[in-house]
Amino acid sequence: MHTLIRRVPFYGWLLAACLALSSCADVPQDANRVVVTPTAASPLVQQTLAPQGVLRVGVYLGSPTSWLRDAKTGESSGVAFELGHLLAKQLAVPVEIVQYPRVAEVIEALKKNQVDMTFTNATAARAKEVDFTPALIQLELGILVPMHSPIQRFEDADRSGVRLGVSQGSSSQGVLSQRLKNASIVPVPSLAQVQQMLNERQLDAFATNKGILFELAEKMGNVQVLSDKWGVENLAIAIPKGREAGMPYLLDFSQRAQQTGQVQKMAQRAGLRGMLPTH
């Protein structure tokens, strides 16, 4: 299967889409992969879940829960990326990976029916805007700090003068803006800018799920993920509102993917850390 990757520009105005064809090597190969075999998708289900005749999967680069791409090999991984490929295969439609700078823009694209699915934190606020399956992964929330930082636990971050970064428009921004009374919450437009702002001491810490934090820590090398947590993300498949006719099929698909261990294998291939044990 060929993967069409479309990158959405950072700014909101309309620019010509940048299209790049990726070979089937983008789809991770695993000889021990468990095959999910849901019921056959009816034409109604195909039309509901992929109304353009292609399954458009919204992702943002740099998160193991969404999309990672190895700079040396070009190999892709990430739970949203792989779930999108698997669902498209079961629906018997092509897949298109649509890249955004951050998760907030993926959610906005779902609201506008510009993409057909993603995998993200299923918060009550987001559930008013998009529909979710039950959670497939629970992930700890934490903070990233420079080595030798005086911030050694989450409570230390809520001090006057502390600049705590969050992804702009993220659920972390909403929660921490309400929860913390003294720290300054600094919205950051993209994960790439997090690294720059921490290195230049424009941020004292950065808060999000630990999957992203460990990924950033490996790239930077001069930071650490604190061991405690300040919350939990419940990650699930999200689709636009108004597609109720496809939800029974999607629920069956997601349940089988979890029960057979396929979701866990996707997480392992992406190097996702900070997960809570599944029950």
Image: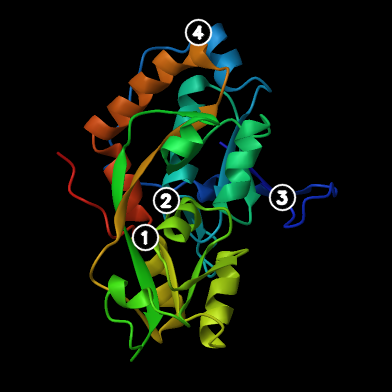
First in residue order: circle 2 vs circle 4: 4
Instruction: Tell me which corner region of the image, top left, top right, bottom left or bottom right, holds residue 230.
Output: bottom left
In three-dimensional space, the C-alpha distance between marks 3 and 2, rounded to whole angstroms, equals: 19 Å
For residue 166, say whether it is visible. yes
The amino acid beneath tag 4 is: Ser
225 relative to 124 in the view: left or right: left
Residue 257 horizontal/vertical position (percent)? 31, 31
First in residue order: circle 1 vs circle 4: 4
**Marking on residue 42:** 4
Few, some or many C-alpha atoms within 10 Å of disc 4 (few <14, some 14-19, many ≥20)?
few
Closer to the camera: disc 4 or disc 3? 3
Q: Confirm or deny contact between disc 4 and disc 3 (CB under 8 A).
A: no
- Which residue is located at x 77 percent, y 51 percent? 12
**Marking on residue 65:** 2
14 relative to 189 in the view: left or right: right
Residue 234 horizontal/vertical position (percent)? 34, 43
First in residue order: circle 1 vs circle 3: 3
**Marking on residue 77:** none
Closer to the camera: disc 1 or disc 4? 1
Instruction: Tell me which corner region of the image, top left, top right, bottom left or bottom right, holds residue 274.
Output: bottom left
- Which residue is located at x 33 percent, y 57 percent? 272
